[in-house]
Amino acid sequence: PRDSVVLATKVAGPSGQMTWIRGGPVALDSRNITEAIDSSLRRLGVDYIDLYQIHWPDRYVPMFGETDYDPSRQYASIPMEEQLEALGKGVESGKVHWP
């Protein structure tokens, strides 16, 4: 039964290299988050997700073995508030549950 499983999945942030993820999104904006939630529900064949998380945010972070933050690599990105509002709308719509 669905209620005996905690289902977790994630939305991937921007990556021009991973074109199989929403065409290689250039931003993790509200539209991309909403599309990712809907696509996850469809692929998983469920009505709701218990835990939905951002795999990597829309901002520069040291990745893949990098240990130092390099401020010169920072780029214009979607505000974290917009990303959180999109996740909140997923909760409000019942597509993502909140404990």
Image (spheres, rainbow, N blue to C red):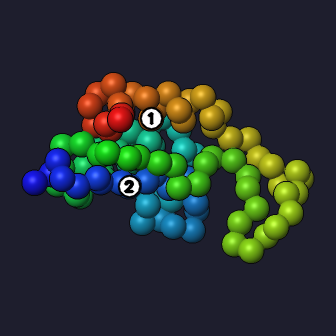
Q: Is residue 60 visible?
A: yes
Give the amino acid at mark 2: Thr
The x and y percentages for residue 8 are: 36, 54
For the residues labelled 1 and 2, the Cα–Cα distance comes to 13 Å
The residue shown at (88%, 57%) is 70
- Could you classify mark 1 by the number of other residues whose Cα lies within 10 Å: few (under 14), some (14-19), or many (20 or more)? many
Q: Is residue 42 visible?
A: no
- Could you say which is closer to the camera, residue 36 or residue 20? 36
| Quarter containing the N terminus | bottom left
| Quarter containing the C terminus | top left
Q: Is residue 29 left or right of residue 44?
A: right
Question: Where does label 1 land, which residue?
Answer: 87
The x and y percentages for residue 2 are: 15, 51
The residue shown at (33%, 25%) is 92
The residue shown at (56%, 30%) is 82
Residue extending farthest to the bottom is 65
Q: Earlier in the sequence, mark 1 or mark 2?
A: 2
Question: Where does label 2 land, which residue?
Answer: 9
